[in-house]
Image (cartoon, rainbow, N blue to C red):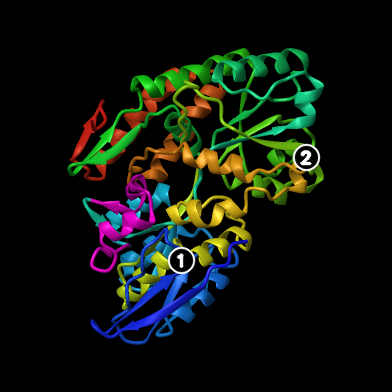
Amino acid sequence: MKKLVIFAVLVALVGVFVVFADSTTYPAYPAYTGPAATITMWAWTSNENYSIDAFEKVYPNIHVVWSNFGVDYTKILTSTAAGKGLPDVIMSEYTYAPQFIEYGSFQPINKWIPESLYLKFFPEYSLKWTSLDGQIYGTPQDSGAIVMLYRKDIFEKYGLTVPTTWQEFAQDAEKLHSENPDIAFTTIPNNWVIWPVGMVWQAGGSMFDYANGKWYVDFTNPTAMKVFDYWNNLLQEGAVKFDTWWTADWYKEIDQGKLAVIISGAWSPEWVSLNSPSTSGKWGVALLPQWDPNNPHNGEMGGSGFYVSSQSKYPEAAALFVLWLNSNPQSLEYLNQKSQLAALVSNVFTTDVAPSLENVEYPYFGGQKIVPVVLEANNQVNTAFVWLPVMDYVQSSMQTEFQKVIDGKESLVDAIPNWQKAVVAFMKKQGFNNLVVGQLPK
């Protein structure tokens, strides 16, 4: 593995402390100009302490106290409303970051991390996850680039080929259903809004966005409806089905070989290996099928960033920490190896860290070198959008409509406009008068 030598020099001409590295692929980090500070962080990623230790050696005047608080978004909102109780740094899924920005839980960090510096470390599209109206609130950590996990034994038994197009995917699903209807080719989660939005994203579209001070909502645009019509047909044929993910029954289906394919984020290979050890050696990881093989594109399901809270007493220290945490090559190595994050968003991960991982064989996946697949999936993500600031309601209203589909009261394509109508009505009731309905920003 490439050895990275991190060192610091005192630049006498300007009297500031600047951090360099032996890599030529990323710039120097800013100096810290504030007083000695202890900052706190809420994050659920495991083993963050390795990156923290490395950071504190380079920024000795900043001490970081990490608390693994889980995904407790209610606590963030409650503390924001109370005006006290937030840490300096908050981990949030990209999906919910706009909600916290609108609510006032985060503060801008452009003073220390201007956009010009941000873009030297992170791809431009990631600004959709970490900024609003030109104000940057944090940095992105892991990629949720969508991949396809498939049961190699089921594919071999029923003569299925790993699909490269959605037409081939449908053919595989129909073939398996005709030969063994007890095995679901794949399932659509009725309790995870990121999944349908991610599938539209993978087709090159979106269902909402933000631009020029306005929220755009268009669940029924041509790209989105192409995707929903596709899944509607497979549902009606019985080739795929709805299911409630993350439950004991769902895990049991995985263990018992009742599910041939899982479509999820880049973190899912690690997740499946931890939650279904009995199926070791039976899985493979592949890129998602494409709508247009000549123009491959991908979306994301999941992924999180680190943001500076509005209550931080040391925002400069917090800003430098979130920059270092998610872009320094040593930190990225730790996040990959110790925290099991398959793909990191930073450009530095692609150039400085990933090459040393490409030949690693994973016994759980039968010795497959899965890193090249995950990296290619991540490379195919080149667009993004801003999630709505009411994602809790977007999910609950989706569950209401999807349940009607499950109960046979409406089709999936009929559910989508009803879903949009509910979301728009809720946003208007919440005072979002800057809505543009029925179109997306150009």
Dividing the picture into quarters, in which one does residue 388 lie?
A: top left
Residue 412 left/right relative to 245: left
Q: Is residue 43 visible?
A: yes
Q: Nearer the viewer, residue 309 or 145?
A: 145
Name the residue rendered at 62%, 23% in the picture.
163
Query: Is 129 covered by the magenta stretch?
Result: yes
Query: Is 90 covered by the magenta stretch?
Result: no
Q: Which quadrant, please, contains the C terminus? A: top left
Residue 371 left/right relative to 160: left
Q: Number of numbered discs present?
A: 2
Q: Is residue 290 above or below residue 267?
A: above
Which residue bears the numbered disc 1? 325
Q: Which residues are magenta?
A: 106-132
Question: Of the numbered discs in the image, which one, if any, rests on residue 46?
Answer: none
Q: Tag 1, which secondary structure?
A: helix
The type of residue carrying mark 2 is Asp
Which residue bears the numbered disc 2? 255
Q: Residue 385 at what x, y percent from top left?
A: 34, 40
Q: CA distance from mark 2 to mark 1?
A: 36 Å
Label 2 crowding class (10 Å Cα cut-off): few <14, some 14-19, many 20+?
some
Q: Residue 193 at what x, y percent from top left?
A: 47, 38
Q: Nearer the viewer, residue 227 or 127?
A: 127
Q: Is residue 193 visible?
A: no
